[in-house]
Every structure is written in C-alpha cells, then in structure tokens.
Image (cartoon, rainbow, N blue to C red):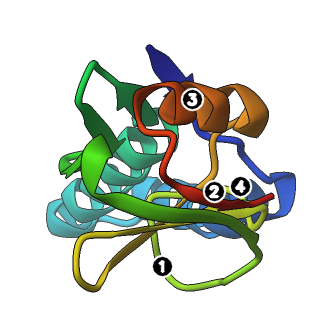
Amino acid sequence: MRFNSKKDLWLGLLIWIPIGGGFIDSLMSEGWLIKILMLATAIFAGWIWFGTSYYISEEILIIKCGPFSEKISIKDIKSIKKTRNPLSSAALSINRIEIRYGFSGMTLISPKDKEQFVGLILQKNNNIDIKI
C-alpha cells in the first residue's frame, strides 16, 4: 500500500520561492550554464517534492524520496513514535514519525495518514513499541 508524504506549506514556500526566483532570474541572464543549472535544480526539487512516498509490502517498508530510496524489513522495526525532529529526512512535514529498526537504524517520515500507516505496520509486526 502506498502512503504519500504530508507536505507543510511553509516548507514548500521555503523550497519553491528561492528556486522559482532563481529560475526566473536565470531566464533573463545571457549565460546558458546558469539556465541549465537552475532548470536541473528545479527538476531535482520537483522530483523530491512530488516523489516522496512510503510503500508497505508484505515484509518491507520502502521509503522513496525522489531518486533516493531505503528499504526496511518490517520485522526489524523496534519502535515508532511521534516527533518534530527537524533532521534532514524523507519527510516533507515537521509532523513526523521516527522509526527505529535493527541494531541502531533510525529514519524519519511523514505519512499523511499516520494512523492507517502505523496500523498496517502493526498488522505485519505486532511487537513494535508504539508511542503516538
């Protein structure tokens, strides 16, 4: 099952206003290199903004953030808790959940429907410590 990332408006503005302004400014410049770089930056940011989601299969949680992906075995998940940790992660909202897995693994994500997401994970592994 696929879960889209929740997206904070302020984060979108923080990302898209400078990129949009830089892109528009580059269109008015004479150099092709800056135009290409700004277009590449906008495409990369768009790939992350529109391509961040989380997939739950029978045994694996797949986290996709643009060109990046991470796979976590659901049986290795130890705990899930609410957090507002601002560390860089595959989350487009500050309202996140922290997933601890394996010996020392940790990731932050922000599914739109946290309750359904956690419920589905618990159906596959009910030994997870939940603090939501």
Position of the C terminus, as image quadrant, is bottom right
Label 3, label 2: how far apart the Cα atoms are: 19 Å
User: What element does badge 3 sit on?
Assistant: strand
Dot 1, how many residues are within 10 Å of its Cα: few (below 14), some (14-19), or many (20+)?
few
Dot label at residue 4: 3
Dot label at residue 88: 1
Q: Residue at x 20, y 55 (%)?
A: 36
Mark 1 or 4, closer to the camera: 1
Dot label at residue 16: 2
Label 2, label 4: how far apart the Cα atoms are: 6 Å
Dot 3, how many residues are within 10 Å of its Cα: few (below 14), some (14-19), or many (20+)?
some
Q: Residue at x 68, y 66 (%)?
A: 81
Depth order, front residue of 58/83:
58
Label 3, label 4: how far apart the Cα atoms are: 15 Å
Sequence-first disc among 1 and 2? 2
Q: Residue at x 84, y 52 (%)?
A: 9
User: What element does badge 2 sit on?
Assistant: helix
Dot 2, how many residues are within 10 Å of its Cα: few (below 14), some (14-19), or many (20+)?
some
The answer to whether residue 42 shows anywhere in this view is: yes
Name the amino acid, label 1.
Answer: Ser
Sequence-first disc among 1 and 4? 4
Position of the N terminus, as image quadrant, is top left
